[in-house]
Image (tube, rainbow, N blue to C red):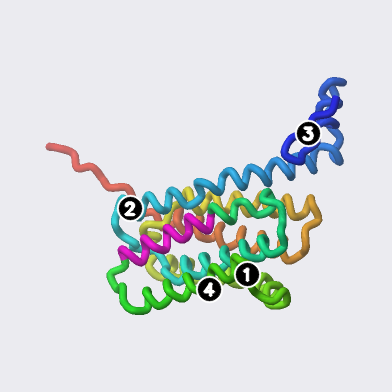
Amino acid sequence: MQLQFAGMDFTCVLDSLEKYQIPEKDCFLPLLSKSLGYAIVCGSVFLKVPQIYLILRSKSIKGLSVPSFELEVAGFTIALAYCLFKQLPFSAYGELVFILLQSLVCLALIYYYSPHRGKGVWIKSALYCALAPTLLAGKLDATLFEALYACQHAIFFFARLPQIWENFQTKNTGQLSFLTNFMATGGCVVRTFTSIQEQAPVSMLVGSLLGLLTNGIVCAQIVAYQPPPKKVKKLE
């Protein structure tokens, strides 16, 4: 019995189950890796929604590091542009489309609610609008694309450092969403596994591990710096 779906072959697993046997590792792990990869794409649709909701609900960007969100947008744009340039299948980069769109919404809200909105915001926005279409259309030299992609892991790493430092200094995480950062950490765990299983380039594995480290630190800070619960005064 042969059963294939979305590029995944379930034949060996079904054959083992029909014989009441546990599937072989060489059969099960590749299938698990691909399934988890698709799960990341599905989960990415909602990754930044909790963060967007918190900003809209509070109408505040307290505790959010603007440079962190700006660098994230730059990193996701480069990563998506590279995947489009290489004409990779959508399953290999699909989450980047949804995460970039949500990151842009987050950054727009941060600019909108920023108490110090000035000319710099408009200049950076105009610069991005001018450069992003060129990148996403692949109108760059291949060597330059490779160089930009090689830098993206450093961009993502340094994107988290301002937020981690701000959290540490203020001992407060403000409007940071634990759910968003927790899902990002889980995504990095899965990408680490899939990178090892599918023998991805070392640079991809390093990127997943760096993401796991920095997102894990932010999650730990959100838990550690939670304000103490308010005590309810008893009526005498």
Magenta segment boundaries in residue numbering: 99-113
Expressed as whole percent of the image width and height from the top left, the position of residue 107 reads: 42, 63
The amino acid at mark 1 is Gln
* Label 1: element kind: helix
Q: Are marks 1 and 4 in contact (CB under 8 Å)?
A: no
Q: Vertical placement of 206 versus 18: above or below?
A: below
The CA distance from mark 2 to mark 1 is: 29 Å
Expressed as whole percent of the image width and height from the top left, the position of residue 105 reads: 42, 58
The mark closer to the camera, 1 or 3, is 3
The CA distance from mark 2 to mark 3 is: 43 Å
Q: Which residue is mark 1?
A: 152
Q: Which residue is mark 2?
A: 56
Residue 111 painted magenta:
yes
First reached walking from the N terminus: tag 2 or tag 3? 3
The amino acid at mark 2 is Leu
Neighbourhood count class around disc 4 (C-alpha, 10 Å): few under 14, some 14–19, many 20 upward: few
